[in-house]
Image (cartoon, coloured by chain):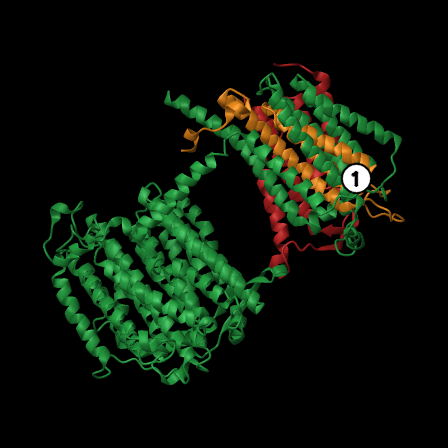
């Protein structure tokens, strides 16, 4: 299962990066969303997919899933939500102010630095 | 515990200042601030009798116990003296500032917050026994000094001066940190006391000299020694109370403190003696020589401070010689450390009062340009008296305290040539000569400062304001300091026993058992010795030079401006700013896509390269979980959804497909026994989709732009590279488990140590609570940023409406 | 765009309370069973989002006059405060304490300072999510 997952995750990353490199703002945001899904699955898979019970103490359960990746992912999920929301607002504010969502047209100019 | 808290009292008090400033408009905020240094000074004064009898007071609070970093407040003679200077002068300066800074026009809350922050930082520097916390406080003084110099931030000069002082002192601070780390590696401890205890063994270490030089860089930049002094004159843009406090009495003495504190460790080294004494003496000469060139009152004082700091530094260097001779108690070197500390006290008194007078002159006449001033004696008699006392003390004239310490300085310098160690017998004669010349110039600029301002012809037409005497409140602090200048002259031995000797004991702990053993008695008259004739020579030559100043002051113009250190600094900064910027523009094109491509390409190249170079890639199917039928279905759904996202033309399809990827991931969490994750993912996905739909209202309709084939191919290659990299990493990570999972520890202790059952949640709130704390902080920041992006614009729109 | 959706509004009211109570349950269960501050907070916000969808922003704000920015801030302060309890007792930052207490009505209960920390997390999550949703929704 882990081997298949490795390929699936690779595919997710590929799609995410491809989207992030495109010109349109919305596609970039979707790309970051995919990237975080990929990363979550990667962490989960790296911890091993074995274990027959959730990592909660209960009588008679010894073979439980690894808790550390889960804790890491839980943090990551919430953060990626915050980041996505931030990106979304940044994107639509940029669109409103600049009138375009084309990244090629949005690059900063020297005048902006001064 | 309590004693460490004293350090933080100012910074805690600072929290209330903005509130007091906003709410209590009737009373000057300074009156509240004044309480802090007065109380602290009283507390520290209560330690005097204990410390005088050789006791030290230690208190400790753990800060980062796992790294062995803690706040240790260690009070011995040296720390106590500095603490008293900081709080005592601090109180006077705050009192002075109440009358100097106008309540209605100035940003008082900013000013006093910075000032209190500085006070804490400075107390921390002089009391820390731990090198790392010392460094922390050290940098905090740089930062608060930066803020205070830039207090009038709408002035170009202020910002320039603030940045300059910051650049130079922080550079020095970083060097010093390096030195500290080396020192701690050598001694295997961060505690200064423990390092001093093993001082003799450290000297043979190969890094000894390197760490010495690095630490001296920190001390020299902070104490404005040549060639780093250039920030101090520019720091005079700060409000005058700040100049009096930070840039003459306290902060610039942090370097002195550091050198004094570490003398027991480093004095054994020849490099130390030569560097500290040489640089100090040269700075003394350089500062006094260029002080005469200045036309700004505070400029004169700035250069004079540089020069006086050099004097103290050179004395500390001389005191280190005592470690190289036998029976140092009986030689004349015993004077050096005593003279250094004694002069430090004296300097704080007379220079503090002079700065305040410079501020008063500026305040009451509207200018500090000495060419426009003159004849103020009859208009401002009290200020004149104070200025005269301060200046004469600075010039080394009796009956003022400067005379005593200047005499001791000359004694120490004269002694240099009599010793045939450290190649002193060939070069030793240079020291008294340089010291003498510098003293002559000191005499000249002292007279120049006071008599050009207060005597001569009154030129009311050049003054922006009509001159008059300052209000009495503003005069209290300088008068107090000036009276100290006189009092100390008559009771030098009481000061010596109470303050100086305990401090000397900290500098030369190997020489004496207790402070009372130090065999020094200060007297104004000690017979017809060489130093007396030197002093008389200084008076005569100095007075002649002062009388003829108009004739030779022009000589300074001969030196071309572009040769100066200031120009060198400016050119270096321009180089950093403009030329390096031009270079970085070559690859920083401003397009995010380019940056992403750089990053991804390098990450892929480095990771895959390392994988194969280190032969880390392995593949095995061992220990993998079995593949179940429904898992295949979920994977298929996931892949199809992802492809839909990639190729969708409409934004709605893309979002729904993304949501479907998210829900599939949640399903994965379910089948892999992660109920917490599954729950969270489900809810987050729902909220996210709602968010996307809300944001859609504002976003463009089309989801993609026309992209050329080459452009897409380019992106595809990078994306493919990343995908392959991740797969390879995942496969090899899966195929080799080098260490067992640490999760066993959590399993065993979750109930006994944390009293919980759900390991994931307990990890979040207990074992790794820091992560969670930072996470919710980041989340809050994101929320506030979003709020800001939306609301701030609304208010701007409203403004535009009003303008119409 | 004003719609009169009686069914949606009535169901939303009921469902809101169900989700809300469920979220509190999930939140409190966190230490021993799946759940905790994050999930609880997110569930509560999703319940609020449901209300927002059924009614409009203004109505919800008059019904529940909560300042979410302050909620976020107090959550952060609570979390930080709980974490620093240890420091005042001479223990490291983030030392948690727990013990058994007898509470009236509920009986023997285990109380944790970790729970307080989690409450901070809960407040922050609800605060931030609602801040985001409200600011985007309120922007026109």
Indicate the position of residue C100 as horizontal and vertical percent values: 76, 54
* Vertical placement of residue B646 versus B439, above or below: above
Give the residue at mark 1: B674
Q: Is residue B505 left or right of residue B756?
A: left
Q: The chain coloured green carries which letter? A: B
* Name of the residue lying farthest toward the left: B457
**Toward which corner of the image does residue B725 lie, by quadrant?**
top right
For image coordinates 61% across by 45% down, the residue present is: B774
* Name of the residue lying farthest toward the front: B613
Q: Residue C21: tell me if it is visible.
A: no
Indicate the position of residue B262 as horizontal and vertical percent values: 46, 69
* Vertical placement of residue B409 versus C119, above or below: below
Q: How many marks?
A: 1
Which quadrant holds the C terminus of chain B? Answer: top left
Q: The chain coloured red carries which letter? A: C
The front one of B704 and C5 is B704
The front one of B677 and A20 is A20
Which of the chains bears the disc numbered 1? B
**Element type where label 1 sits in the image:** loop
Indicate the position of residue B83 as horizontal and vertical percent values: 42, 65
Which quadrant holds the N terminus of chain B? Answer: bottom right
For image coordinates 74% across by 24% down, the residue present is: B641
For image coordinates 53% across by 24% down, the residue present is: A104
Q: Residue B160: tell me if it is visible.
A: yes
Q: Residues within 10 Å of mark 1 (few under 14, many from 20)?
A: many
* Vertical placement of residue B704 versus B490, above or below: above
Q: Is residue B795 left or right of residue C80?
A: left
Indicate the position of residue C27 as horizontal and vertical percent values: 73, 40
Identify the hue of chain A: orange
């Amino acid at each position: 299962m882990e081997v298949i997952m490795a390929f699936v995750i690779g595919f997710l990353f590929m799609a995410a990066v491809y989207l992030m490199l495109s010109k349109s703002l919305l596609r970039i945001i979707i790309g970051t969303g995919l990237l975080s899904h990929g990363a979550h699955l990667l962490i989960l898979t790296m911890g091993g997919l074995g274990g027959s019970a959730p990592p909660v103490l209960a009588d008679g359960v010894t073979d439980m899933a690894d808790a550390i990746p889960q804790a890491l992912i839980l943090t990551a999920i919430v953060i990626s939500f915050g980041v996505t929301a931030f990106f979304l607002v940044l994107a639509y504010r940029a669109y409103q102010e600049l009138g375009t969502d084309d990244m090629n047209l949005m690059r900063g100019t020297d005048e902006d630095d001064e | 515990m309590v004693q460490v808290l004293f350090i933080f009292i100012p910074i805690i008090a600072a929290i209330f200042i903005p509130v007091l400033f906003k709410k209590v408009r009737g009373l000057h905020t300074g009156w509240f601030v004044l309480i802090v240094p007065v109380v602290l000074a009283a507390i520290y004064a209560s330690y005097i009798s204990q410390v005088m009898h050789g006791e030290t007071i230690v208190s400790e609070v753990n800060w980062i116990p796992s790294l062995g970093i803690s706040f240790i407040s260690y009070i011995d003679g040296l720390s106590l003296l500095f603490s008293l200077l900081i709080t005592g002068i601090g109180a006077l300066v705050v009192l002075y500032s109440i009358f100097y800074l106008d309540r209605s026009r100035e940003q008082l809350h900013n000013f006093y917050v910075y000032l209190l922050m500085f006070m804490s930082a400075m107390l921390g520097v002089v009391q820390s026994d731990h090198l790392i916390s010392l460094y922390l406080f050290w940098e905090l003084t740089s930062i608060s000094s930066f803020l205070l110099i830039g207090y009038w931030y709408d002035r170009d000069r202020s910002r320039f001066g603030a940045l300059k002082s910051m650049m130079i002192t922080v550079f020095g601070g970083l060097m010093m940190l390096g030195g500290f780390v080396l020192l701690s590696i050598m001694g295997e401890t961060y505690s200064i006391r423990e390092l001093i205890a093993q001082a003799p063994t450290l000297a043979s270490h190969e890094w000894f000299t390197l760490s010495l030089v690095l630490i001296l860089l920190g001390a020299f930049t902070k104490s404005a020694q040549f060639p780093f002094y250039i920030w101090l004159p520019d720091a005079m843009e700060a409000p005058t109370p700040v100049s009096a406090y930070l840039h003459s009495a306290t902060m610039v003495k942090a370097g002195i403190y550091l050198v004094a504190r570490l003398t027991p460790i480093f004095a054994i080294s020849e490099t130390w003696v030569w560097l500290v004494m040489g640089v100090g003496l040269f700075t003394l000469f350089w500062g006094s020589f260029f002080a005469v060139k200045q036309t700004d009152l505070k400029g004169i004082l700035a250069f004079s401070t540089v020069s006086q700091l050099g004097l103290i530094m050179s004395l500390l260097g001389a005191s280190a010689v005592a470690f190289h001779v036998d029976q140092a108690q009986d030689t004349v070197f015993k004077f050096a450390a005593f003279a250094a500390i004694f002069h430090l006290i004296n300097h704080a008194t007379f220079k503090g009062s002079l700065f305040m007078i410079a501020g008063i002159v500026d305040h009451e006449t509207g200018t500090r340009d000495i060419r426009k001033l003159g004849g103020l004696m009859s208009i401002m008699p009290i200020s004149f008296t104070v200025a005269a006392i301060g200046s004469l003390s600075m010039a080394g004239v009796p009956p003022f305290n400067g005379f005593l310490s200047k005499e001791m300085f000359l004694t120490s310098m004269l002694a240099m040539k009599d010793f045939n160690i450290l190649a002193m017998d060939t070069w030793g004669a240079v020291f008294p000569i340089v010291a003498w010349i510098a003293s002559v110039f000191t005499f000249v600029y002292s007279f120049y400062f006071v008599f050009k301002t207060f005597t001569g012809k009154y030129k009311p037409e050049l003054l922006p304001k009509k001159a008059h005497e300052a209000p009495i409140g503003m005069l209290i602090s300088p008068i107090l300091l000036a009276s100290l200048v006189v009092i100390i002259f008559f009771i030098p031995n009481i000061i010596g026993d109470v303050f100086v000797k305990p401090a000397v004991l900290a500098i030369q702990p190997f020489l004496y058992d207790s402070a009372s053993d130090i065999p020094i008695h200060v007297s104004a008259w000690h017979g017809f010795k060489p130093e007396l004739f030197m002093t008389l020579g200084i008076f005569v030559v100095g007075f002649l030079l002062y009388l003829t100043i108009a004739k030779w002051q022009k000589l300074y113009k001969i030196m071309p401006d572009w040769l100066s250190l200031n120009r060198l600094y400016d050119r270096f900064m321009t180089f950093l700013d403009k030329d390096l910027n031009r270079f970085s523009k070559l690859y920083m094109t401003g397009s995010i896509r380019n940056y992403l491509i750089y990053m991804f390409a390098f990450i892929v190249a480095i990771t895959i390269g390392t994988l194969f170079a280190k032969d880390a890639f392995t593949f095995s199917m061992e220990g993998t979980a079995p593949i179940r039928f429904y898992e295949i279905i979920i994977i298929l759904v996931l892949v199809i959804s992802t492809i839909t996202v990639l190729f969708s033309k409409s934004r709605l399809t893309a979002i729904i497909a993304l949501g479907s990827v998210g829900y599939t991931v949640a399903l994965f969490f379910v089948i892999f026994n992660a109920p917490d994750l599954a729950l969270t993912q489900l809810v987050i996905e729902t909220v996210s989709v709602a968010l996307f739909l809300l944001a859609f209202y504002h976003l463009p309709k089309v989801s993609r732009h026309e992209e050329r084939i080459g452009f897409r191919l380019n992106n595809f290659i990078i994306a493919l590279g990343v995908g392959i990299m991740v797969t390879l990493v995942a496969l090899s990570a899966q195929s080799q488990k080098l260490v067992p999972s640490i999760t066993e520890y959590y399993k065993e202790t979750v109930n006994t140590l944390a009293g919980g059952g759900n390991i994931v949640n307990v990890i979040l709130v207990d074992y790794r609570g820091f992560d969670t704390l930072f996470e919710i902080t980041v989340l809050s920041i994101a929320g506030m940023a979003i709020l800001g992006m939306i609301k701030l614009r609304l208010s701007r729109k409203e403004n535009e409406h009003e303008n119409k | 765009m004003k719609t009169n959706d009686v069914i949606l509004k009535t169901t939303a009211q009921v469902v809101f309370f169900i989700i809300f109570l469920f979220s509190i349950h999930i939140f409190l269960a966190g230490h021993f069973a799946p759940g905790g501050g994050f999930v609880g907070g997110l569930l509560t916000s999703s319940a609020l989002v449901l209300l927002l969808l059924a009614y409009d922003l203004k109505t919800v704000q008059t019904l529940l006059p909560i300042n979410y920015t302050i909620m976020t801030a107090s959550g952060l302060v609570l979390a930080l405060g709980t974490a620093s309890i240890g420091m005042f007792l001479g223990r490291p930052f983030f030392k948690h304490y727990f013990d058994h207490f007898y509470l009236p009505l509920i009986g023997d209960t285990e109380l944790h300072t970790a729970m307080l920390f989690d409450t901070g997390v809960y407040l922050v999550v609800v605060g931030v999510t609602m801040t985001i949703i409200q600011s985007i929704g309120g922007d026109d």
